[in-house]
Amino acid sequence: MISATKAFAPAKINLTLHVTGQRDDGYHLLDSLVMFADRVGDRICVNPSDEISLTVSGPMAQCVPLDQRNLCWKAVELFGTTAAVHLEKHLPSEAGIGGGSSDAAAVLRALSSMTGRVVGFDTSLLGADVPVCCHANSARMSGIGEVIEPVAVPSLPVILINPRVSVPTPRVFQALDNKANAPMPEIPHFENAWGFVRWLSEQRNDLEPPAMAVQPVIAEVLSALAGCNADLVRMSGSGATCFGIFLDRDLHEVAAKELRAAHPEWWIQDTHLI
Ligand code: C5P
């Protein structure tokens, strides 16, 4: 009997996100350094079935579509099979941390392992963030998201905060004034996390100002993280999730406690980017 196949869908964090141009079809050219969260993510379970089905549970299950609109469903269709997918949803949606894309990538990993077949289609058909989520390791992402270059960088202790407001990505891109910004320089070899953070502090997320215009609470999240003495604070993707890097282990722990106490209404995770 073939048993259930499980896969983890980690949160994707854009440590940098430089918007360097726009294609004729409206999609933006990006240059982004992406890492994935350790243990913060959704869980996928796939079972063989002669039709496609999707069920969802978990703390963030509310409002998740259970039909073809869900990227998990589309991933099964494009893989060219049928399966019963269960999604345990822990990540907020429309949050700039690739929840739906990471779910789709995890479904593809599970289907691959269940069937012994490789993914035989361009995964960017599922969305610009899906190729990097299939890679699921630190990478420099460019093009509109389809060009993936693995990078070796030190792991980072972070606190992730989403103020529980959803931010539609197209609205943020529309609100971006300058679409032709400088790309990242070459990513050097870092001796340690301090050097990495120093380099990151010279980079940007070009979507931060337009996302703040759409959801002003983002500024409050960034200032709460900075107020806890984070070494670097920035927004991920098109928001609203922000991250604070805390290289000091004690400070990391204390900040997570303080932020949870001060903002019980926010989604707050302390983890490592790996
Ligand atoms: O590809 P995905 O469905 O994730 O993109 C959602 C929306 O974000 C697109 O419809 C587009 O408006 C915007 N987008 C963009 N350039 C990218 C990625 C996304 O303009 N590279």
Image (cartoon, rainbow, N blue to C red):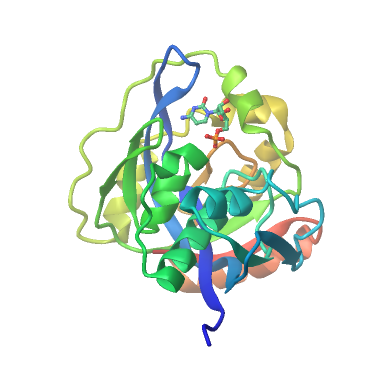
Q: Answer left or right for 172 relative to 205.
A: right
Q: Answer left or right for 166 relative to 176.
A: right
Q: Position of residue 148 (x, y in %)?
A: 30, 44
Q: Nearer the viewer, residue 81 or 88?
A: 81
Question: Farthest front residue?
Answer: 50
Q: In which quarter of the image is residue 269?
A: bottom right
Residue 81 seen in the figure = yes
Q: Quadrant of residue 140?
A: top left
Looking at the image, how many numbered discs can be counted on the residues?
Answer: 0
Q: Which of 257 and 16 is in front in this view?
A: 16
Q: Position of residue 39 (x, y in %)?
A: 53, 71
Q: Answer left or right for 231 relative to 262.
A: left
User: In terms of image quarters, where does ligand 1 lie?
Assistant: top right
Q: Position of residue 61 (x, y in %)?
A: 77, 60
Q: Where is residue 83 in the image (x, y as percent from the top left)?
A: 60, 65
Residue at the spot x=66%, y=43% of the render? Answer: 94
Q: Which of 207 and 222 is in front in this view?
A: 207
Residue 227 seen in the figure = no
Residue at the spot x=61%, y=39% of the render? Answer: 239
Above or below 232: residue 86: below
Residue at the spot x=69%, y=61% of the render? Answer: 53
